[in-house]
Image (tube, helix red, strand yellow):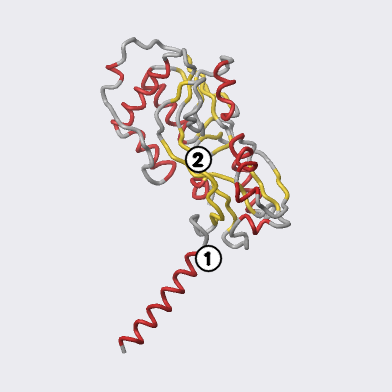
Amino acid sequence: MKKKIRVIAFELSILLLISITGCGIGGNNKYRVADKLTQQEFCVAFRLDDKAGDTVIAALKVLQASGKVSELSLKWFGEDVSLLKGDEKALDKLDEEFETRTFNIGYDEGRLPFSGKTNGGMATGFDVDLAREVCKQLGWKAKFLPIDVSQAVVELNSGNVDCVWGGFAYDEGDTDIYQSPVYLKNTIVLASLRSSGVRSAAGLKGKTLTLSENGYFNALLQSSKSLSEKPEYTVKVPGGTEACFKALDDGSCAAIITDLAALDYYK
């Protein structure tokens, strides 16, 4: 009897293992993660000579201590994924007074739930809400300007924006700009419909892969080992993240390169 129970338990464990591996590595009941391509750490970028960087970082620490960052994280991601260390007295520790100003914020307008725009063209997303709260804390007026955040050095040093915030990835080797502490981690994935047969990059043979105009995603397409050692497929770039999910949902493509957090946002 015990031997029979062990056999049944073994068979059930095999079935469970098959069901788990068959569903891919993550995702939800609509979208499958066919491959995890890379991980990013998000921060805010500033010009080296602009003391606004220290002021913004201090305001972020105050907001973290107050629970506001966690509140926004729950709103956009359904859980608290913030990594900041809070300090309710961070602004009091600054050496200089901060003056009222218009703060020009460069952001990615096509990367929700981190940053994007509403149907009416208004900036929105977790990073956008967080930037607004910082400016509110400091008495600044926030002005959002859509840019390619992967070109942060050019945008900042040209004076076009005062900071890059919204899907900007920390780069330890970049000494041309001032970067805040990391406040969020993000995973970029290859995603497909759960109902499709695309379970890895190998499944793209003869099919269409879609990605947004984001500079990070385009660079990843060239550098990813799983995508470079690939069967031939067609690449389309329709716009931002929302356009990618529309293409995936209506069958215009077999898979997309996107953010892991976007799978739940668009399901």
Residue at the bottom extreme of this rendering: 1
Q: Residues within 10 Å of mark 1 (few under 14, many from 20)?
A: few
Above/below status of 76 relative to 122: below
Q: Which circle marks residue 262 in the picture? A: none
State the residue position of label 1.
22
As shown in the figure, which amino acid type bears the numbered disc 1? Gly
Seen at 42% across and 14% down, the residue is: 51
Seen at 39% across and 24% down, the residue is: 134
As shown in the figure, which amino acid type bears the numbered disc 2? Pro
Tell me which corner region of the image, top left, top right, bottom left or bottom right, holds residue 236.
Answer: top right
Give how far across and how far down residue 141 sits, in percent. Answer: 46, 18
Give how far across and how far down residue 127 sits, in percent. Answer: 46, 32
Tell me which corner region of the image, top left, top right, bottom left or bottom right, holds residue 58.
Answer: top left
Q: Secondary structure at mark 1?
A: helix
- Mark nearest the camera among 2 and 1 is 1
State the residue position of label 2.
113
